[in-house]
Amino acid sequence: MLEKLDLAKVLSKAEYKERMPLLEAKLGKLQRECKELGIPVMIAFEGYDAAGKGVQIGRLIRALDPRGFEVHAVKRETQEEQFYPFLWRFWTKMPAKGRICIYDSSWYRKVLKDRFDGKTEEKDVAGAFRSICSFEEQLVDDGMAVIKIFLAIDKKEQKKRFKKLLKSKETAWRVSERDLKRNKQFEKYEIMNEEMLAGTDTDYAPWNIVEAVDRRFATAKIYAVVIQALEQKIKEKKQSGESEAALIGVRQQGGEKELLSGDSVLAKADLSLSYTKEEYKERLKGLQKKMEKLHGELYRRRIPMVLGFEGWDAGGKGGAIKRLTEAMDPRGYVVHPTASPNDTERAHHYLWRFWNDMPKAGHVTIFDRTWYGRVMVERIEGFCSKKEWQRAYKEINDMERDLTDAGAIVIKFWLQIDKDEQERRFKARGENPQKQWKITDEDWRNREKWEQYEEAVNEMLIRTSTPNAPWIVVEGNCKYYARVKVLETVVNAIENRLKEEEKRG
């Protein structure tokens, strides 16, 4: 791909001066349209060292309103960033709807410079390509304009530019030993770039290769690439007619019936399982003692853990979480109760707020309600389109795989009770002044949609329970039994991970 480029392409000064005012005016207009339509934009600049990424970004933003964009210079991961999955720092630097983010180097660093330096092992490259493609596909499906630009120069031109930079004290700092090493081994690095381009050039996020020896030619081509991409995105947005207002209130029901043939997952739960109070106290004490020790091991070995709790209203999530955390060091865990998204969260991809709350290595994050709201409440109540919740299964599986690939233990719990038990608990809460705050009119209304939610939950469990991030259905009619099962599951998962690590040495 790169070796066939004609790097001799040039644009005369006169032609450049003639073209640029028109291109700049057009780009400024498109930025305003994107803002009005709520289209977020991510522009990733990649390419060889000294190809001019900084220069070209500087020229591109001349046409933009500075109140509507941010530029992120992506360097080596900080110590803090190393404690998270590699895409975490890009999820947290994502533009809201109507804004633009420009990246001087990007999420591709992992499969380029980090790979060349040996920081990314060869066995991890294919997985990184998969994660990157999934990341971009999710964003594009959610309405993001993802524009990828690769600036190409040859070995000779790169060496010439390095020499020029090194001559001046003011610019010599911009050339590192690693830069010079990549120039000496240009052919090796070129192969890595070729593999990256081939492995991540998709119809939803294609690569735009820019011949960058002549800077004026490169600037004009970059403007043309960005303008064309934004025009296409704006056209798609207008043609689709899908505005936020149109999506809200569109009720989508039903699922893939063939997946739910026979007994449902929830129907198989034996809700008669129980413990006496004495059995419960004895088991709880032993498990909490183990949990106290294992929590310390997670921190010592830098193993992150993500626990997601879902279930029927009054299913016992809070009680299970309380007994789990009672034996844990409060400095090493956090519980996130997930409510309806606020305005800032609605301005981003629905997974954005959860990525922001993921634990760093050695810590535990517990979600009381999770990202699965997309395929339950948002599906049933019509807060997203059918197309959106149907593709969410893959998006969620991909996110959880990114977490486990980064070393996290991921477990999801569904607290299962029957309808009669829920009614009994609702009434008990209503009669108890200290617990009346737990019951709302909405809880009673949701009971009327029990069958719809049951169908959605069964489909969710089937589609998103994976070996690396399993769903655990917790029989919850007996709270004692449910709390013990949750603790046993977490303890066993940590013990199994520690055994695996010991085997690996």
Image (spheres, rainbow, N blue to C red):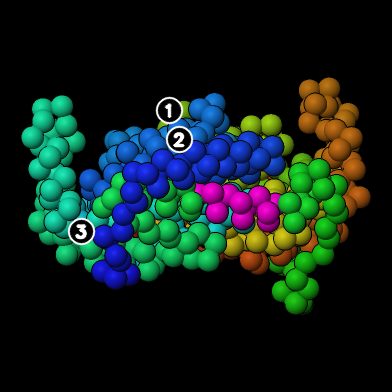
Percent x, y for residue 134? 50, 59
Q: Is residue 95 magenta?
A: no
Task: Inspect this view and state whether residue 22 appears.
Answer: yes
Question: Please, what secondary structure does the residue beneath circle 2 have?
Answer: helix
Q: Earlier in the sequence, mark 3 or mark 1?
A: 3
Disc 3 vs disc 1: which is toward the camera? 3
Distance between the Cα atoms at labels 2 and 3?
26 Å
Q: Which mark is residue 154?
A: 3
Bounds of the magenta segment: 226-237
Percent x, y for residue 1? 32, 70
Q: Is there CB contact under 8 Å for labels 2 and 3?
A: no
Disc 1 vs disc 2: which is toward the camera? 2
Mark 1 neighbour density, 10 Å: few (under 14) some (14–19) many (20 or more): few
What kind of residue is marked 1? Arg
Q: Which mark is residue 159?
A: none
Percent x, y for residue 180? 11, 48
Vertical placement of 261 versus 194: above or below? below
Q: Earlier in the sequence, mark 1 or mark 2?
A: 2
Mark 3 neighbour density, 10 Å: few (under 14) some (14–19) many (20 or more): many
Q: Quadrant of residue 55?
A: top left
Distance between the Cα atoms at labels 1 and 2?
43 Å
Depth check: 434 or 344 in front? 344
Q: Quadrant of residue 17?
A: top left
Q: Residue at x 44, y 65 (%)?
A: 201
Query: For this view, does 452 lie left or right of residue 54?
Result: right
Q: Which mark is residue 331?
A: 1
Provide the major secondary structure of the magenta segment.
helix
Q: Residue furthest front?
A: 14
What kind of residue is marked 3? Asp
